[in-house]
Image: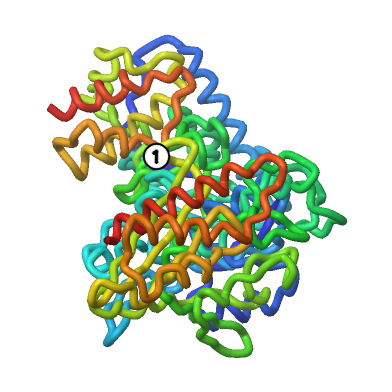
């Protein structure tokens, strides 16, 4: 790792002002599960690390009226074990429980999981790819079994987060703080396609950090779940995952949010799958149709067509859990 | 670097290969941190040397508190092995994937290759050396021996620490609990069943 200075931020204000003071040279860091790996590999070479873990108060889960507030420094393991979160947001807790390994869940944070960088082997490896300021994405012509089937181009990474699909399915909002002020946006709008920014996965400016996640308490009749399909049973990124939140009334689906991981450069909300469910009973037929509809726009690369079939299957499977 | 409390027993006599190497390591590190040994006349004219960018921290490892000056880029695994001579903690992938470097930080199993030492000022850490600090093996270590849970042995200290973290919060885990707790520790010899048997035996 190249040498750098460590600055322990003691407040959000101090953190964002430190980031603003060192444009292009400072990066925020929480547990470092992802960023330290990038620094060891020379993908990122910051001169200053702004340590966010020393900011008090950002590691709390708080129940508010109508919502639960999640501090970005809450460890993933705490989400996985939270009875409060399990009561209201099963998809969130199920997603947290299958992230990485116990050692990473013990330290890795909610904010870090949402802001982690792609796992594409060209991005992580010694390739000057599009995402690292190079000329082109190697995936379409190269080894692309883990790459995007939806929303790809000109970069074909997939977003690796498990919490993001779950939180978007649960209609979470994100508060972002920067040196020019705060803004709160739907988490869905936090992520951006490569057509918007080919080098970043989200809208954070260099002097901005995530400072809160707000999840609205679900309306009565809402159920949610997260299905993560891996190559092995544990300690892996998703080949494909799906978070589903469904509200039913009088035997019919009143509201549906279906968000996929591992298929697109952003957590991929399938409006097609949602439309296939609204106003109809949730059963084996409609669950299968939702999966089929979700995959209509899919454009697999040479080696990842299996993700289309897998996506259909796990969308159906996740929905059947919610009947 | 100074130890405020010394509780490790020195061997009564003779020199072991490991003891010799560990001693050499410490000597080299000490001179790097403190600067060359000066004669009395030089000492009056030269300022004390200290590489730029070091940060002072205090770490309590296996009950011993160490005052250290660390570079921000040094990982906990590097500090444990290269600067404190605690080479029981292994570095496998150095990428937070294999688990060989697992230690217990404030009661929780973590990858020491993925923690910067500069973040850990005032924290308590237990390494595999801490399992047998009194000289008697921990029940887990005895069970690992009895169940041949170590093959090449490289992952063993990490497996022990993950298992120790599990047993300290769950005295009687199920087989599935053990398997789940050890998912972050890879064994290239693939001796997973032996390791799980050992942990289950130690929990009885």
The foreground one among A296 and B188 is A296
Q: Please give the name of the residue rendered at 77% of the width and 42% of the height, measured from the top-left corner.
A: A126
Q: How many marks?
A: 1
Q: Please give the name of the residue rendered at 49% of the width and 30% of the height, measured from the top-left corner.
A: B90
The residue where tag 1 is placed is: B103
Q: Would you say B48 lies left or right of A134 here?
A: left
The foreground one among A190 and A293 is A293
CA neighbours of label 1 inside 10 A, class few (<14), some (14 to 19), many (20+): many
List the single residue furthest toward the bottom. A181
Any part of residue A87 in sight: yes
Provide the secondary structure element on which disc 1 rests: strand
Q: Would you say A41 lies left or right of A273 here?
A: right
The foreground one among B173 and A6 is B173
Q: Please give the name of the residue rendered at 47% of the width and 63% of the height, measured from the top-left corner.
A: A165
Q: Would you say A279 lies left or right of B36 here?
A: left
Residue B149 falls in image quadrant: top left
The foreground one among A156 and A47 is A156
* B32 is higher (above) or lower (below) than B87: below
Q: Position of residue A100 (x, y in %)?
A: 45, 46
Q: In the rendered image, which quarter contains the C terminus of chain B? A: top left
Color theme of the render: rainbow
Q: Position of residue A170 (x, y in %)?
A: 39, 72
Q: Position of residue B117 (x, y in %)?
A: 51, 50
Q: Please give the name of the residue rendered at 30% of the width and 55% of the height, measured from the top-left corner.
A: A321
Letter of the chain that mark 1 sits on in the rendering: B
List the single residue furthest toward the top. B14
Any part of residue B38 in sight: no
Q: Position of residue A63 (x, y in %)?
A: 27, 79
């Amino acid at each position: 790792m190249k040498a750098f200075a460590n600055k322990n931020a003691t407040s959000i204000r101090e953190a964002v002002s430190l980031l603003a003071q060192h444009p292009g040279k400072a990066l925020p860091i929480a547990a470092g599960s992802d960023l330290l790996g990038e620094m060891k590999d020379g993908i990122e070479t910051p001169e200053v690390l702004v340590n966010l873990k020393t900011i008090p108060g950002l590691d709390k889960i708080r129940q508010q009226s109508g919502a639960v507030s999640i501090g970005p420094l809450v460890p993933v393991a705490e989400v996985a074990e939270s009875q409060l979160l399990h009561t209201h947001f099963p998809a969130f807790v199920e997603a947290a429980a299958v992230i990485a390994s116990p050692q990473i869940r013990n330290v890795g944070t909610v904010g870090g999981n949402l802001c982690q960088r792609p796992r594409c082997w060209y991005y992580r490896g010694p390739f000057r790819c599009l995402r690292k300021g190079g000329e082109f994405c190697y995936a379409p012509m190269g080894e692309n079994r883990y790459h995007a089937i939806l929303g790809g181009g000109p970069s074909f990474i997939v977003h690796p987060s498990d919490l993001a699909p779950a939180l978007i399915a649960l209609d979470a909002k994100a508060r972002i703080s920067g040196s020019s002020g705060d803004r709160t946006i739907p988490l869905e709008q936090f992520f951006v396609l490569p057509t918007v920014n080919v080098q970043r996965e989200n809208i954070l400016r260099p002097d901005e950090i995530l400072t809160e996640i707000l999840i609205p308490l679900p309306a009565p009749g809402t159920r949610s779940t997260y299905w993560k399909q891996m190559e092995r049973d544990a300690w892996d990124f998703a080949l494909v995952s799906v978070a589903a939140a469904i509200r039913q009334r009088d035997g019919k689906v009143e509201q549906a949010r279906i968000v996929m991981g591992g298929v697109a450069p952003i957590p991929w909300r399938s409006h097609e799958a949602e439309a296939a469910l609204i106003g109809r009973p949730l059963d084996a037929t409609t669950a299968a149709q939702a999966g089929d509809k979700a995959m209509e726009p899919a454009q697999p690369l040479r080696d990842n067509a299996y993700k289309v079939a897998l996506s259909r299957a796990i969308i159906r499977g996740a929905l059947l859990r919610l009947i | 670097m100074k130890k405020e409390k010394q509780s490790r027993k020195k061997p009564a006599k003779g020199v072991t290969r490991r003891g010799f190497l560990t001693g050499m390591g410490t000597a080299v590190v000490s001179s790097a941190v403190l600067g060359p040994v000066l004669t009395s006349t030089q000492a009056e004219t030269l300022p004390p040397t200290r590489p730029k960018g070091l940060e002072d921290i205090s770490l309590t490892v296996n009950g011993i508190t160490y005052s250290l000056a660390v570079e921000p880029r040094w990982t906990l695994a590097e500090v444990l092995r290269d600067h404190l001579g605690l080479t029981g903690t292994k570095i496998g992938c150095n990428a937070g994937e294999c688990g060989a470097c697992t230690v217990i930080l404030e009661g929780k199993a973590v990858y020491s290759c993925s923690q910067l030492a500069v973040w850990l000022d005032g924290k308590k850490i237990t390494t595999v050396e801490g399992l047998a600090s009194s000289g008697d093996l921990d029940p887990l270590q005895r069970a690992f021996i009895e169940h041949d849970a170590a093959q090449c042995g490289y992952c063993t200290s990490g497996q022990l620490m993950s298992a120790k973290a599990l047993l300290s919060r769950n005295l009687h885990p199920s087989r599935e609990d053990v398997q789940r707790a050890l998912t972050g520790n890879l064994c290239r010899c693939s001796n997973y069943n032996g390791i799980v048997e050992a942990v289950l035996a130690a929990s009885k």
